[in-house]
Image: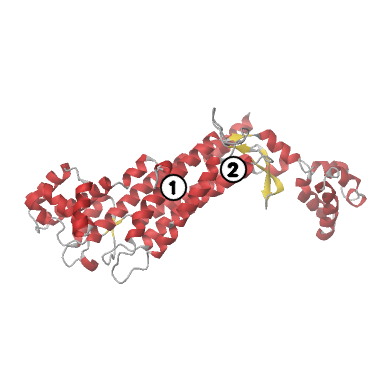
Amino acid sequence: MIPRYSRPEMVSIWTPETKFRIWFEIEAHACDALAELGVIPKEAAKKIWEFGGKAEFDVDRIDEIEREVKHDVIAFLTHLSEFVGPNARFVHQGMTSSDVLDTCLNVQLVRAADLLLKDVDGLLAALKRRAFEYKDTPTIGRSHGIHAEPTTFGLKLAQAYAEFSRCRERLVAARKEVATCAISGAVGTFANIDPTVEEHVAAKLGLEPEPVSTQVIPRDRHAMYFATLGVVASSIERLATEIRHLQRSEVLEAEEYFSEGQKGSSAMPHKRNPVLTENLTGLARLVRGMAIPAMENVALWHERDISHSSVERMIGPDATVTLDFALVRLTGVIDKLLVYPENMQRNLDKLGGLVHSQRVLLALTQKGVSREDSYRLVQRNAMPVWRGEGNFLELLKADKDVSAKLSAQELEELFDLGYHTKHVDTIFARVFGKDAVAAAKGKAAE
């Protein structure tokens, strides 16, 4: 986690100050529940909130204590006692360190998920706006990087919108997966603390009680969470890679916004490089790389060990901070993306009509020609055009075997670009629902 790829709101979730404040709230809420059960005096619970709630926890002081006791939770509790005084003996009654650590981690992951969902909503809004802007702008579709058949640039963006809508659903599920609380004591049996304490703390923190915590919250939950972040990162890379390809000089159908005074190369003043989407590709690799350690954390020894701890101290902040930054950066790229419909049309025309080859193939089969013979007839006229030797439509017209089945007018009709985009409204309706239907009706009324 470095400042260059960080945003303050997400970073703040992972600061020591935030962590210790959550630790205190867990302990104080537990004291309230214990007081209701008569385990500790109600006045003690009140004083713990009174003194601890106003405390400014000294990170350096806690670190100093930890250097001696070699235990982070004990160091915090010792520091807390310096504020609370004698009533500190009622703090952490029947609890174990994992109750605090695991519940705190899940609070942080839930808060991080809320920010990530907000980020995705911003990206979806940008994608939707640009998709409708270029809904009917024809462009060439490519398979294997080679010209295939026409599509529209709006459909490219609609695909991304649909993908990130799925990402949003996955994030909602991941948030729910980790929104659990464990206040169950050593080995998770509640031997020294009543289960109602866990229920109370969970309710106060917006979590659900963990059904069986075994002293730690099961790490399959966290594995699913970080795997989801990896999938979102992969979707970011997919869209970033598409933009990088479209920005290549030989294509130049779209490119990142290039601001006044920006410089693309230290050596070549003419350069306008896709630096933001290249950066997003790299960030996506980092987030994905954190999913594997999270999965390896699932297999802990017996009721608990701490082999997961060092991993989570790193991937918790790093994965969420990095993904937060990447989503917001991608939103900016889409929002300001420069789009060149003229270049799209030029590229569509580049292969001399070959993009309509399937229509000719199908038309010949409809005239009684076998599929094998139809393919052969179309391909023998397509290959010279591929080599830059003529126009596809004219070669087909001059082919006696083809013209015997299809008239010149019929062939010309097969080269209608609109044929390939006739169902764009249908696809948009599937992706955008009533908004797309309303837009289509408005267009028809014009």
The CA span between labels 1 and 2 is 19 Å
Give the residue drawn at x 93%, y 50%.
400
Q: Which residue is mark 1?
A: 323
Q: Which mark is residue 298?
A: none
**Quadrant holding the C terminus:** top right
Q: Amino acid at mark 1?
A: Leu
Camera sees residue 135: no
Q: Which residue is mark 2?
A: 243
Q: Position of residue 9 (x, y in %)?
A: 35, 41
Marks 1 and 2, the one that precedes in the sequence: 2
* Drawn side of residue 300 relative to residue 182, left or right: right
Give the residue drawn at x 60%, y 43%.
244
Q: Position of residue 218 (x, y in %)?
A: 33, 64
Residue 403 versus residue 211 in the image, above or below: above
* Drawn side of residue 161 relative to residue 89, left or right: right
Q: Residue furthest right?
A: 400
SS at circle 1: helix
SS at circle 2: helix
Give the residue drawn at x 78%, y 52%.
362
* Label 1 environment density (alpha carbons within 10 Å; few <14, some 14–19, many ≥20): many
Q: Position of residue 143 (x, y in %)?
A: 67, 51
